[in-house]
Image: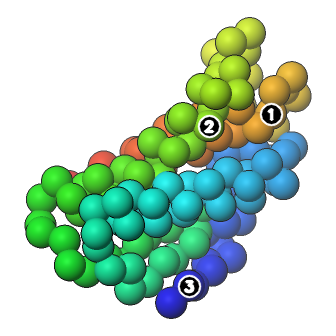
């Protein structure tokens, strides 16, 4: 079952990329695709996917507790990081631009994916603790 949380997506857009909301929605789709791919590679059964940008979740059954669940949880940030790295990453971007969600960027999709990867990794660590 797929559930779309519009409040979570809107909050993610505000935190990740106010100037590029279309890039944030694409990065959120890549994020959820990463979780799905990791769950399928670990032969888990996907019960639910909650699409909420950095605040989404995946309900997967058939996996042992421990590292497989953590691998599914970190599959989204890993996929965003890989996409960002393949698109050129944050080369040529100042640190202030990297953290400012309204900054004008030369490679917005790469930077938005990096921002979403960082935010989602922090949220995932918070949820696992």
Question: CA–CA distance between discs 3 and 1?
Answer: 28 Å
Where is residue 103, by image quadrant? top right
Where is residue 98, by image quadrant? top right
Residue at the bottom extreme? 1
**Image location (x, y in percent) of residue 97:** 73, 22
Q: Earlier in the sequence, mark 3 or mark 1?
A: 3
Question: Disc 2 designates what residue?
Answer: 83
Residue at 63% x, 80% y is: 4
Which color scheme did the rendering employ for the protein?
rainbow
* 105 relative to 26, above or below: above
Q: State which mark lies toward you, 2 or 1.
A: 2
**Image location (x, y in percent) of residue 57:** 43, 70
Residue at 69% x, 21% y is: 88
Q: State which mark lies toward you, 3 or 1.
A: 3
Q: Earlier in the sequence, mark 2 or mark 1?
A: 2
Question: CA–CA distance between discs 2 and 3?
Answer: 23 Å
| Residue 82 shown left or right of residue 95 in the figure | left
Callout 1: 10 Å neighbours few (<14), some, many (20+)? many
Judged from the image, the secondary structure of the residue bearing numbered disc 3 is strand
Question: Disc 1 designates what residue?
Answer: 108
Question: Disc 3 designates what residue?
Answer: 2
* 96 relative to 15, above or below: above
Question: CA–CA distance between discs 2 and 1?
Answer: 12 Å
Q: Are marks 2 and 3 in contact (CB under 8 Å)?
A: no
Visible residue check, residue 6: yes
Q: Earlier in the sequence, mark 2 or mark 3?
A: 3
* 124 relative to 4, above or below: above
């Amino acid at each position: 079952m797929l559930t779309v949380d519009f409040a979570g997506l809107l909050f993610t857009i505000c935190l990740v990329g106010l100037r590029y909301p279309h890039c944030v929605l694409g990065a959120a789709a890549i994020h959820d695709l990463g979780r799905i791919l990791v769950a399928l590679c670990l032969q888990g059964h996907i019960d639910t996917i909650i699409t909420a940008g950095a605040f989404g979740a995946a309900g997967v059954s058939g996996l042992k507790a421990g590292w497989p669940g953590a691998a599914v949880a970190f599959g989204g940030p890993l996929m965003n990081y890989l996409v960002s790295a393949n698109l050129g990453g944050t080369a040529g971007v100042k640190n202030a631009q990297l953290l400012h969600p309204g900054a004008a960027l030369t490679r917005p999709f790469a930077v938005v994916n990096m921002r979403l990867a960082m935010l989602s990794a922090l949220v995932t660590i918070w949820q696992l603790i």
